[in-house]
Amino acid sequence: MRERQTPADRLRILFDAVAPGERARAGVDELIAQLAPHFEQAGDDVIWLALSVLRAEFPMRERVIEVRRDLRLRGSRTVLRKLAHQPARGSVFSGRAVPTVRVVREATVVDVHHTARTGLATGIQRVVRKTIDEWVKDRELVLVGWGPGFGGLRELSSAERENALYG
């Protein structure tokens, strides 16, 4: 079972993604101060990434626009502090476990949701399995499927991975 991620953990993950190679500080306030300059003129891609990491789900377009507007009106420190302290998807109030967030670099993320969950071995499943077999020869792969509510991706369980690879 994975450890629960704190707001500081998620901010550190976000910092590592937007400032690779720089050393992240320890506490929430220090991380927010370190991240703030990266969000003063942030594009939608950086805002989308921040929401994905801090909320543990892919944001809708409207939410990205709302945060972009907040960044310009309220400033990056205020907005980052607010986002860091909002409960992530799957909080104790919903009864679901909060998903563990990981930003994948240096690997190819492959959505094999259907193939991992079906017993079929017809057209698309064969194509997916053959593609995985070819891709794995020259690159690292992370096989994923959609999580509950289809709000974000999750790594496959070992049984799902086995089914995705071999049927």
Image: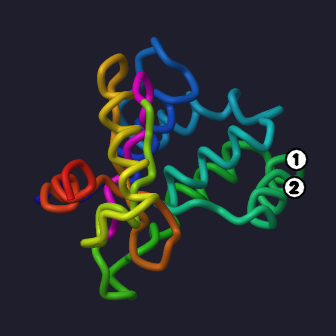
Disc 1, disc 2: CB below 8 Å?
yes
Residue 93 is situated, as x and y percent measured from the top left of the image, at: 38, 87
Residue 3 in which image quadrant: bottom left
Residue 167 in which image quadrant: bottom left
Magenta region's main secondary structure?
loop
Q: Amino acid at mark 1?
A: Arg
Figure quadrant of the N terminus: bottom left
Looking at the rendering, the stretch of residues picked out in magenta corresponds to: 98-107
Q: Amino acid at mark 2?
A: Arg
Residue 121 is situated, as x and y percent measured from the top left of the image, at: 30, 63
Is residue 99 shown in magenta? yes
- Left or right: residue 47 versus residue 121 is right
Q: Which residue is mark 1?
A: 72
Give the answer, above or below, for where 83 lies relative to 141.
below
Give the answer, above or below, for where 5 lies relative to 45.
below
Distance from the alpha carbon under mark 1 to that under mark 2: 5 Å
Q: Which residue is mark 2?
A: 69
**Helix, strand or loop status at disc 2:** helix
Residue 91 in which image quadrant: bottom left
In this picture the colour scheme is rainbow
- Left or right: residue 137 versus residue 11 is left
Residue 67 is situated, as x and y percent measured from the top left of the image, at: 77, 57
User: Mark 1, residues whose alpha carbon is within 10 Å: few (<14), some, or many (≥20)?
Assistant: some
Residue 62 has which mark? Answer: none
